[in-house]
Image: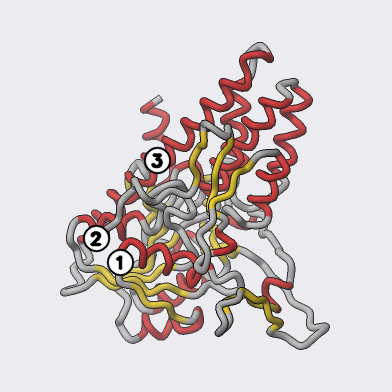
Amino acid sequence: MFSTDELSSLRWDPVAGAAEIIDQTLLPHTLRWCHLESLDDYCHAISAMQVRGAPLIGVTAAFGLAHAIAQDASEAGIRSASERLLATRPTAVNLRWALEQVGAAVAGLPEGERAAAAHDKAVALRAEDIANCEAVGAHGFELLRKLNPGDTLNLMTHCNAGWLATIQWGTALAPIYKAQEAGLPVHVWVSETRPRNQGTNLTAWELQRAGVPCTIVADNACGQLMRQGRVDAVIVGSDRTAANGDVCNKVGTYLKALAAAANDVPFFVALPESTIDWHCASGDEIPIEERDASELLSIAGRDAAGELREVNLAHQGSRGLNQAFDVTPAPLVRALITEHGSFEASVEGLGKLRAQLDAAR
């Protein structure tokens, strides 16, 4: 069974005075915790995808900035550290959001008080992420339980949007964990998510540890499964959602949304409100990260002798284009599931969320 006490992607080690993360580039073969002891460590962890997933990137950056402020609390030092962290990944909006949250927490304070305030804010953001993701799970479960599929609820997800992408619970996987907790039989189709195989390496590993039945399938098999009636709903996460409801997520999400629409399969997106970019009018304005082509042209895994190896897939000298994200237009999204409830993916739907947030302030 799922236990939030056991599953966490980032924790604070008060003895070492450092954040600890799981090096996700080693999963599923090796589970290794790493201390982040310098600003270089934090920047590398984000850019090299030792941590990934918009919410986790944000919290990691918050701790990274707090660490930098403990070393240099001057305005120039804070600005320099923020710029370095912001440059690590261009697409996930939570990165900028978290840095702004820490920056606001220390603004106007004497330099001697800034380090403690920054650390406290990072710790608070971590706690908020856990609570928000659990709330996303609860609201998402209410949608899933209404699907009434029969004996087993067959869901499909893409990439990894579980506790490895947040702190605990996750976004897209949180409703699945809530379904399991409630005793609703569930099975998950896990798309491999080429080229970095986050579905195979992370989501399947995570679901297996939680005891959730799952099956890994090739990315290109997902449309056929929907056509065969073997998928009751698709649920994914988001790295940035525009104010009109367009969703930017791991590349391949758009194709699943198209297949879901063609086969009348509900397509849900689960996300915390911090992943909504209220200043971004549409998905056309979202920068799409292009990563090194080597991720596409090679692959890493464990050989028959148990050794981890990387091998080339393409002919030497081959060129590759490795776009890490794509944009799913809002009309293809059945609902946006947030910690505040579920909303229509549209200007009007997100306008209702914005009004709800303004009324609560």
Q: Residue at x 73, y 24 (%)?
A: 72
Return the disc, 1 or 2, that comes first in the chain's sequence: 2
Residue 123 placement, left or right of 154? right
Which of the labelled discs sits on residue 353, or is there none?
3
Q: Position of residue 316 (x, y in %)?
A: 80, 85
Which of the labelled discs sits on residue 13, or is there none?
none
Q: What residue is pinned by disc 2?
A: 180
Return the disc, 1 or 3, that comes first in the chain's sequence: 1
CB-based contact (under 8 Å), mark 1 and mark 3:
no
Q: Position of residue 84 (x, y in %)?
A: 74, 41
Image quarter of residue 306:
bottom right
Residue 49 appears in view: yes
Q: Is residue 348 above or below residue 359?
A: below
Marks 1 and 3, how far apart in space? 32 Å
Q: Is residue 102 above or below residue 38?
A: above
Residue 328 placement, left or right of 1? right
Q: Residue at x 36, y 27 (%)?
A: 360
How dense is the environment of label 3, judged by Cα within 10 Å: few (below 14), some, or many (20 and up)?
A: some
**Amino acid under disc 3:** Leu
Q: Circle 2 — which element?
A: helix
Q: Is residue 173 above or below residue 195?
A: above
Q: State which quarter of the image contains the C terminus.
A: top left
Q: Residue at x 62, y 22 (%)?
A: 115
